[in-house]
Image: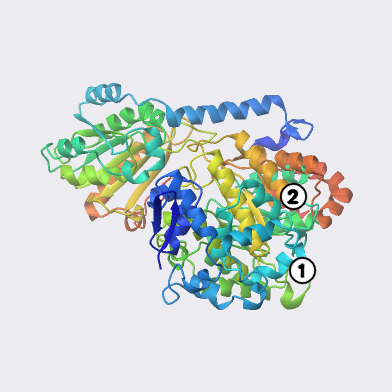
Amino acid sequence: MLELRRFTPARVGLERAGNAIGTRELLAFQLAHARARDAVHGPFDTGALATEIEAAGMQTLAVASAARDRPEYLRRPDLGRRLDGASRRAVGETGGPWDVVFVVADGLSPLAVQTQAAALLRAVAERLDRAEWRIGPVAIASQGRVALGDEIGEAMGAALTVMLVGERPGLSAADSMGVYLTWSPRAGRTDAERNCISNIRAEGLSTGAACELLVFLMRESRRRCLSGVALKAGAVPGIIREP
Amino acid sequence: MSYAHTVGSVTHRFDDLKTLLARATPRRSGDELAGVAARTAKERVAAQMALADLPLGEFRRELLVPYETDEVTRLIVDELDGAALANVAHFTVGEFRDWLLGEQATPAALAELAPGLMPEMAAAVSKIMRVQDLIAVAAKIRVVTRFRTTVGLAGRLSTRLQPNHPTDDPAGIAASILDGLLLESGDAVIGINPASDSVESVVTLLRMIDRVRTTLRIPAQSCVLAHVTTQMEAMRRGAPVDLVFQSIAGTEAANASFGVNLGMLEEAWQAARDLKRGAPGDEGGNNIMYFETGQGSALSANAHHGMDQQTCEARAYGVARHFRPMLVNTVVGFIGPEYLYDGKQIMRAGLEDHFCGKLLGLPMGCDICYTNHAEADQDDMDALLTLLGTAGVNFIMGVPGADDVMLNYQSTSFHDALYVRGLLGLRPAPEFEAWLERHRPELPRAVSLLASGGNAEELFRA
């Protein structure tokens, strides 16, 4: 029944060993799960990422959420949405106001942002007219969830926050990055007030395509002074969904 | 009212009934996140001891969420059959556990008891039961429902065939359906989680499965798990809706976060009954609704009112039983590690949900599953699958290779269902089993047709 496979990425037509799945397929599954697990628990080298981003002509700022380690991050999503004390002080001293503040957070896949965030930031920075857009230091956030960008953006005086974050790894992709755009960030923003570009990875949405969509959304958001469901309603093309 | 229990020289106090229940709950991350869990292992056991001494009648006297402000509480209280509880009404929670495990709690006695039990009573007793207790009592209870197949009979284990596709591609979905049918899956329902909630897409999928079903003469029912309002619109457009799906939770506010209320569910139930597609019987077949639940949903909507997540879950069953559902599915590990941290917590939660649902008279199935950020793997799923099989679960999921490529989580595979059926001598629903015997030889031809033609809709029109 191997011919079924060309119709779907699902694991159809698997070989059987008795009632079980055959050894080759069993181990292929285990490998996919191992990749996903390693992506969730893998290291986030913020120093290397900062070097890459600075090479693209942007300043950076390392911050951390109130979640102290990975197990706490997984158990306590509320802590991943708040800065720790030292970071809160640091983001308050970055000057501003800014037209946009970018945040790069490990989320559930450090691998995703480690490999893709700098390239997307470079592409976006090249597209934006720097006379029109004052870009704040890029906050590189450890143990961060999407809503952490609200506190960072608010404290830095950002009109717009763009959060690049590692998405929850699946068996088919462990390195998928999501981008969340929030106009007028402040604590308590809901997901309905954001726009999301999802599935950014080599086999998914390319950096170039993601850049086009993001720049379009940023311009529209600034023009209309809003983000989220209302912005999406204004004829946004392509692969965009609410978070 | 406050409660207390003294262990040695220490007296543990619990401010109210919901706090007592929360502190007595076996450890899980969601209750810790909510700040309602016991702070020490000793406090937990003290709460369990206090709970064991509590008369069952206390749950009727102290409602966990006020009657006036929560329609789920009103539904639970208004529909309670006091006479059904008569045999056990005088028990404490601890005595109730002992009775459930004893010989007097026959299958017939347990079936009679169900309409008299409040969900909170079921939740309470489960908190002082071990895994073997949860299995032993649940295994005595059969809840049988019927649409085109009969699900829940002794010696049977059914599956929901879950042929999801990332873009709802009909040929991709057809490929997964055929693969599942070849592996004896689909006798509980063929149910698709659509990637898009648009009415057009839902109607297309409903017509496609219906064509597969009628062409291959499969005695099964179908479902597209869109929001209930989308399914109602599909019915208005004449789509072939068999089962009506909705996610539900145990408080009015949590249901509101799903965009539903009881009136809406009632309306959908009536609309589906009017289609008269179900088993012949009064009102054109009554087992029509397909509900999904899962511990943690009320907390995730910030609508738990200080209750622990397992008690909230049992209250969702209080919602479900009003609608005489065909299937109730606890999607146990989908919600993530902030609610159920690891394989151990997922395993216990799945068995609690199955036990509480069955005790309340529901046709319980379980999506034995996990996400990649939980501390769980296939071994944990095998363990829970084997345990639920012995507990007499009505149905489990059948997902190609256990990998749902649309929802990005891992469930049970078609092969997993074959394993547990083989191990425990369980068979598919009788109607489906008879169909397999007679029509399985036609399936390879359908596969070849799909492979040569490509268009699933055309294929199944033939």
Between the residue at mark 1 and the residue at mark 2, the CA separation in whole angstroms equals: 28 Å
Whether residue B403 is visible here, answered yes or no, is yes
Of residues B437 and B319, the one drawn nearer to the viewer in this rendering: B319
Tell which circle, 1 or 2, labels the residue nearer the N-terminal end. 1
- Side (left or right) of A118 relative to B425: left
Tell me what residue is drawn at x 39 percent, y 50 percent.
B10
Please check whether the numbered discs 1 and 2 fall on a single chain. yes
The answer for which chain carries disc 1 is B
Residue B452 location (% of width, % of height): 74, 40
Kind of residue at badge 1: Ala
Camera sees residue B226: no
Along the viewing direction, whichever of B293 and B282 lies nearer the viewer: B293
Secondary element under disc 2, as helix, strand or loop, is: helix
User: Is B225 placed above or below A95 here?
Assistant: below
Badge 2 amino acid: Leu
Name the residue: 57% across, 62% down: B93
Q: Is residue B362 above or below residue A198?
A: below
Q: Residues within 10 Å of mark 2 (few under 14, many from 20)?
A: many
Q: Nearer the viewer, residue B426 or B24?
A: B24
* Residue B198 position in % (x across, y down): 52, 59
Q: Quadrant where the N terminus of chain B lies?
A: bottom left
Residue B459 - label: 2
Q: Quadrant of residue B354?
A: bottom right
Q: Which mark is residue B279?
A: 1
